Image: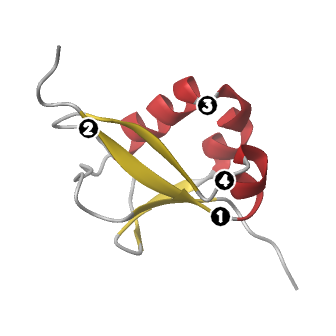
Amino acid sequence: MNCLAKKVRVRLFAGLKEAAGTDYIETEWKTGQTAGDLKRNVMLEYPKLQGWISRSRLAGDKEFLPDSALVCPDVELALIPPVSGG
């Protein structure tokens, strides 16, 4: 058992929210995890969201995070899919 692992809540928006059928999901977080790692975990845990997540960006405390950024478990996380409009 990994005592440094815990669940984090990730808010979903737009098509991601519709595909998941919920406003948020929970995934495992581990010390030293990056935004890219967290996105990969979500794709493994929620396979029906893979297409969306691969095109989405992870935000932490309302700022987009590069895939190399370390993710802290105590920040508000959100997956934001690409948007289009006119």
Question: Which one is earlier in the sequence, the residue at label 1 or at label 4?
Answer: 1
What element does badge 2 sit on? Answer: loop
On screen, residue 79 versus residue 36, left or right, reads right
Kindly identify which numbered label has been placed on residue 46.
Answer: 3
Q: In which quadrant of the rendered image does the N terminus lie? A: top left
Kind of residue indicated by mark 1: Phe
Question: Which one is earlier in the sequence, the residue at label 2 or at label 4?
Answer: 4
Q: In which quadrant of the rendered image does the C terminus lie? A: bottom right
What element does badge 1 sit on? Answer: loop
Q: Residue furthest top?
A: 1
Distance between the Cα atoms at labels 3 and 4?
A: 12 Å
Distance between the Cα atoms at labels 2 and 4?
A: 24 Å
The mark lying in front, picked from 3 and 4, is 4
Distance between the Cα atoms at labels 2 and 1?
A: 22 Å
Q: Residue at x 27, y 50 (%)?
A: 71
Kind of residue indicated by mark 4: Thr
Question: Which one is earlier in the sequence, the residue at label 3 or at label 2?
Answer: 2
Say few, some or many: other residues with alpha carbon within 10 Å of mark 3 (under 14 / 14 to 19 / 20 or more): some
Q: Residue at x 48, y 40 (%)?
A: 39
